[in-house]
Image (tube, rainbow, N blue to C red):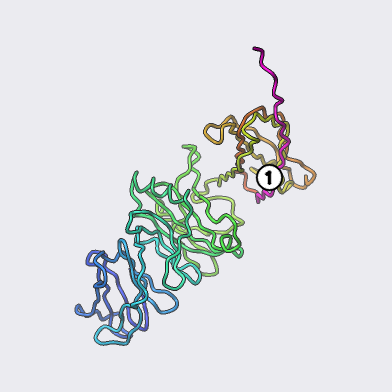
Amino acid sequence: MGAVLYNYGLIFDKTTGDVRLSGLLNLATWDSTQFFGRSINTDPWQGLHVTPFGTIVLPGTRTGEHWYYAQTSPIPFGPDTSGGFARGLAATFSIQQLGDSTVWLSRGPEGDYTVVRVAGYSPQRISTHAVEFDISQIADDVGIEDAIGQVYGEHGHLFYVLTFPAGKRTWVYDATAAAQGLNAWTKRGTWIQADARFTYWRNVFHTFAFGQHLTGDPETNVISRLNHDLHTDVEDRPIRWFRRAPSILDEHQNLVVDRLELRMDVGVGLQTGQGSDPTIMLRISKDGGRTWGNLHTAQVGKPGEYWRRVIFRQLGMGRQWNFEFSGSDPIPWALSGLYVDARRVQRTGRAA
């Protein structure tokens, strides 16, 4: 891992746990005696990150510290005595700059996995219990050391994308939504249609260059353009999305759902080809998401059919309802609400 700070080149060598320095204003000169290592704590550094504010973040396996430009000789950098923290770095390349803060996949001295965000010197937990449970499962199954973090901004939202190639999944943190008190974490994936499954989101290595968001696919070595208005994934694969609504129940009594209406943009189908008569799919669980029934489908409107209503009827009876919507047509999907007509089944007396 490398960076440039105060006209010095910095290279972190994870094998030795040291940071090497180049000559001043000379990245072609690297004196073998010009390096610094960890001395405050015993757990070795796992990565290096330079912030826009001129500090060096150096997390270890369990703890970490901030260094600053001390203007000392022969090594011009030194540790900030107030910049220590008790969170380690669980995956070297997960550390990224997210706005005014630094974020990474962390492991604490107690062995727990969290995603933390550092504004100033103190790491703050930003992951949820659900995210942390899933990360722990990946760690137990295949390990998380290969996790890759990346950051990009689009349409006023700032995203931290945490990809687990071995674990075959990707978690995304929306910092803008979090600042507004909204749900910040979602999953993304690339839909492998032939296997009917998701893998990790293969738009992994991001950079903003030439006025475009560019990403690299580690499996094909192809660079793609990332844009909200594009409707295909890597290798021109269809993008399949799905969204689940919260559970609906009434004192755990049997409910009959007579009608369900989805509030969404309609009449936005394409003129020709796939998406000219777009379809949305519904799966239903009546046991709180443990099992799921067959697919129900509904049309969401050919071009100009703005009068279209997306309604499902006579969905049956159950105690704890969950609704999952999905689609893969290349149209601008926008879901905003769900209306459910449900009634409790009347209790009847039982003969003695």
Nearest the camera: 17 or 232?
17
Q: Does 158 sit left or right of 91 as displayed?
A: right
Nearest the camera: 112 or 205?
112
Circle 1 residues within 10 Å: few <14, some 14–19, many ≥20: few
Name the residue that disc number 1 marks: 272
Quadrant where the N terminus sits is: bottom left
Residue extending furthest left?
A: 33
Q: Does 305 sit left or right of 158 as displayed?
A: right
Q: Residue at x 64, y 43 (%)?
A: 274
Over which residues does the magenta segment extend?
332-352
Residue 200, given in percent of the width and then of the height, sits at: 45, 49
Residue 33 in the magenta stretch? The answer is no
Q: Is residue 133 above or below residue 315?
A: below
Residue 337 in the magenta stretch? The answer is yes
The amino acid beneath tag 1 is Thr
The part of the image, by quadrant, that contains residue 22 is bottom left
Residue 198, given in percent of the width and then of the height, sits at: 48, 43
Q: Is residue 47 shown to the viewer in this render?
A: no
Residue 19, given in percent of the width and then of the height, sits at: 27, 73
Provide the secondary structure element on which disc 1 rests.
loop
Quadrant where the C terminus sits is: top right
Q: Is residue 311 shown to the viewer in this render?
A: yes
Q: Does 293 sit left or right of 39 as displayed?
A: right
Q: Is residue 292 above or below residue 232?
A: above
Nearest the camera: 212 or 264?
264
Q: Residue at x 74, y 46 (%)?
A: 267
Q: Residue at x 65, y 51 (%)?
A: 332
Q: Does 113 sit left or right of 334 as displayed?
A: left
Q: Is residue 211 above or below residue 327?
A: below
Residue 73, given in percent of the width and then of the height, sits at: 25, 87
